[in-house]
Image (tube, rainbow, N blue to C red):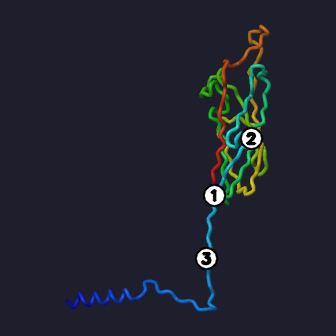
Amino acid sequence: MKKILSVAAVLAGLSATPAFAQAVPTFGDNLTVNLAADVAARCDARLNGGDGTVLNIDFDTLSSTDTAAQVTRAGGSVTYICNDPDGFTRTITSANGGFLTLNGAATTANNRRIRYTVQHGGGSGLGFAETQLTAPVAANFGAMLSGQTGGLTFRANGVSQLDPSGSGTQVTTVFAGDYSDVVTIAIAAR
């Protein structure tokens, strides 16, 4: 019985003492106010044309353009922003390896694909020379708090040539139909 009473007395004594005793400040003491905020990383790209995320480029009919010539189309411009202090990685890819393909289907048959190139302008290292997207074009950049803009230019090869048999007739190097590809510009904070 003694043990039970002594434990009960200790418990009663603990409940009378505040668990977290706090010092009561007096006038004249220094006061501290801790402030905090969080800013999420934001690294994005925006097309300055189309709806801001999708832009459609049409080379029209390439059957009247000689194979030695190119049809050029401005692709508008892209503005990049990034508040991550480590910057961002930009990767530009082609679904069909830098070719417009018949019905957008992957193929290696030259009579079902049309070569095209892309060129990117802009400062801060954004720009690169005309290139076919046979492989992803990736580059790292620093932070761009106020944004940086660079223009896009696409060029497709013509598909018209004189008949190789010497008849003097213009023929095409590819089958008739709709040709397409999808270029993706991906941005990732580093």
How far apart are labels 3 and 2 at the CA level? 45 Å
* Side (left or right) of 4 relative to 85: left
The residue that disc 2 covers is 49
Which quadrant of the figure contains the C terminus?
A: bottom right
Find residue 59 and report its image quarter: top right
Which amino acid type corresponds to the residue marked 3 in the rendered image?
A: Asn
Image coords of residue 84 (percent x, y): 66, 58
Q: Earlier in the sequence, mark 1 or mark 3?
A: 3
Q: Please, which residue is most extreme toward the top here?
A: 167
Task: Residue at 70%, 43% (x, y): give it.
Answer: 52
| Crowd band around label 2 with a 10 angstrom C-alpha radius: few (<14), some (14–19), many (20+) | some
How far apart are labels 1 and 2 at the CA level? 25 Å
Q: Which of marks 3 and 2 is nearer the N terminus?
A: 3
From this viewpoint, is residue 62 visible?
yes
Placement of 30 over or under 43, stated as above or below: below
Find residue 168 and report its image quarter: top right
Placement of 34 over or under 159, stated as above or below: below
From this viewpoint, is residue 128 visible?
no
Task: Residue at 69%, 26% (x, y): give it.
Answer: 114
Which quadrant of the figure contains the N terminus?
A: bottom left
The residue that disc 1 covers is 41
| Crowd band around label 3 with a 10 angstrom C-alpha radius: few (<14), some (14–19), many (20+) | few
Q: Do the residues bearing badges 3 and 2 touch, measured as CB atoms within 8 Å?
A: no
Q: Earlier in the sequence, mark 1 or mark 2?
A: 1
The residue that disc 3 covers is 34
Which amino acid type corresponds to the residue marked 1 in the rendered image?
A: Ala
How far apart are labels 1 and 3 at the CA level? 23 Å
